[in-house]
Image (cartoon, coloured by chain):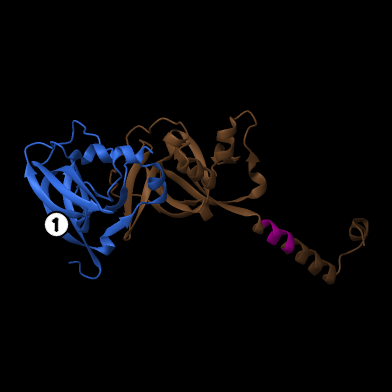
Chain colours: A blue, B brown
Amino acid sequence: MSRAGSLPLVFCQAAGTPVALEARLVKTARLAHAPSAAEDFAQLVGLSKTSAHEEGGPWQILHCQNAGALRQLAVHGPLEIREQPLPALFPLPPLLAARCQLRGLRALLLPEAGKNQNCTLIFALPDPPEKAGE
Amino acid sequence: MDADDLNSRPITLDEALAARQAHAETHTEEAENLLKLVIFELAGERFACHGERIREIIFQAEVYFVPGCPDSLEGVINVRGDITSVIRLNDLLGLPQAPGGHRRSSILLGHGNGMDSGIRVGQVIDVVDIPESEIHPSPANLPEHLRLRMPGILYFAGQAVTLLDLDRLFADYAKGLG
């Protein structure tokens, strides 16, 4: 349940990048050895691995529901659910929104000053590839 | 009364005051035509933006990388609790990266075409008021897309300074043209 002034998010990793989804979209999660039939979230949103990135923890399969459709998304752990204060969530600046190629990117969460970490990318659930191409 | 009258007899106080008033009005008109410009260096060349388009000059900020963006978009910075993108002006203008990285660079917080963004530039040289008449159209042989982004040229401290149009730069960049 969300407190006023905060948003519950599920935090995980995709292609070595910290990412988050709205917790209300994630129904369950389970540990897995491989993504198997689940959609690779990193591929789905267009995040590419670089040699500098590490995969993070083991695969986690998120069972997500959006607009009545059930989806299975493969991400990397560690998985964490956290209430995020709204002032810490930033909408995308306009030029970044216009030029960023990541599908479904909706907001950013910056690390605390001086922590020298990457910002967390907050996604809406993007359409499956076949639907997105229509 | 014409100039000959003034030259042929001593001037009266009324005439002196009227002349002074006219001179003051002329200067007021000139002051209205002054443009505030922020002049900066980038890759060995000098550029300027209209001061009214620059909200702030930031000399040091932590830039957070955002994947999935073109190389010309350096990342985002936190400006007193709000975030803004930072674009690399040298990439937009096809200029080489400055040697020595960001050691002497600044970020101009610019506003153009209804959008705000940080602009990575080299060293800020000066913020000056320049008469509008000192700004000349950019050379006609400049390619049209550059002429629209760089509509004027002026000389400051003996060096050519290219005036940039942030409205055009930001609009082009948002359309993927930068």
- From the viewer's perspective, is residue B5 above or below residue B171? below
Provide the chain ID for the residue under circle 1.
A
Observer-nearest of B176 and A127: A127
Identify the residue position indicated by label 1 in the image. A81
Asked whether the viewer can see residue B109, the reply is no
Q: Is residue B131 among the parts visible in the rendering?
A: yes
Q: Secondary structure at mark 1?
A: strand
Q: Could you tell me residue A92's position as x and y percent?
A: 35, 52
Quadrant in the rendering for residue A50: top left
Q: Residue furthest top?
A: B141
The magenta span reads: B25-30
Give the prevailing secondary structure in the magenta stretch. helix
Q: Position of residue B21 (x, y in %)?
A: 76, 66
State yes or no: residue A54 in magenta: no
Taking depth in this image into account, of B156 and B86 the one nearest to the observer is: B86
Position of the N terminus of chain B by quadrant: bottom right
Residue B136 falls left or right of residue A46: right
Residue B139 lies, in percent from the top left, at 63, 32
Q: Position of residue B37 (x, y in %)?
A: 54, 50
Q: Residue at x 13, y 37 (%)?
A: A35
Density class for disc 1 (Cα within 10 Å; few <14, some 14-19, many ≥20) is some
